[in-house]
Image: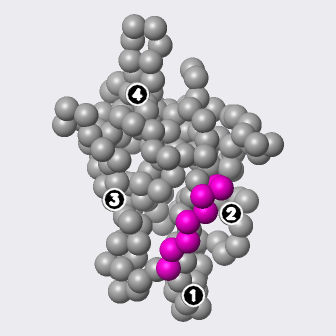
Amino acid sequence: LYVRDIFYGLFNINMSMEEEINKNAIRLYYNSKSLCTFFNKVLKIPSGPKKELSIPNYIKSNEGYLKCFLRGLFDTDGCTILQKMGKYQYKLIKITTGCKAFAEELKVVLKSLEIKSYVCRKTWKNSVVYDVMIRRKHSFYRFMKLIKPKNNKGKINGDARIRTPISRYRQLSV
């Protein structure tokens, strides 16, 4: 798996894996107090459930870090979709989060990279989630060029991935 390979490459650890078929998910885990401390104190990643998220200032203030952050976020929580409306097809990028403020912050940092996006609120299984959507052709290709996703989830005609990965959220109809 992609994320497991990243952890091995960065930290030389083999993460354990559990499949959660009823949630359509795979859980990766590794028990390490020192690794948790590093994520929390150095990288500023909060421990526990992520109810309130924000992008740390050291990432927002450095364009290189920001691009890497967006790449990692997309590779884990994003997908590309080929949406059909009548005889037209649109490529779009979607990043899903449960935190509205985080979705709005993503919209702002994408705008700083000249990538237009919007936030869409939806309800799924009695939970509210927010999709950050990049739909305009120019913004779609700018995101792919600047962010360079690593987990491209497939290709069509050498183009950026146009298939929804396994997801517990239904596709948005715009």
Q: From this view, report whether residue 134 is shown above or below residue 112.
A: above
Mark 4 packing: few (<14 Cα in 10 Å), some, or many (20+)?
some
At label 3, the amino acid type is Gly
- The residue tagged 2 is 50
Q: Which residue lies furthest to the left in this view?
A: 158
Give whichever of discs 3 and 4 has the lower sequence position.
Answer: 3
At label 2, the amino acid type is Lys
- The residue tagged 3 is 64
Q: Which residue is drawn at 64% across and 72% down?
A: 46
- Which SS class for mark 2? loop
Q: What stretch is highlighted in magenta?
A: 16-23
Residue 7 location in percent, x, y? 40, 76
Which numbered mark, 2 or 4, is in the foreground of this view? 4
Query: In the image, is residue 20 part of the stretch drawn in magenta?
Result: yes
Residue 47 location in percent, x, y? 66, 75
Q: From this view, report whether residue 43 is shown above or below residue 113.
A: below
- Which SS class for mark 4? strand
- The residue tagged 1 is 31
- The residue tagged 4 is 82
- Which SS class for mark 3? helix
At label 1, the amino acid type is Asn
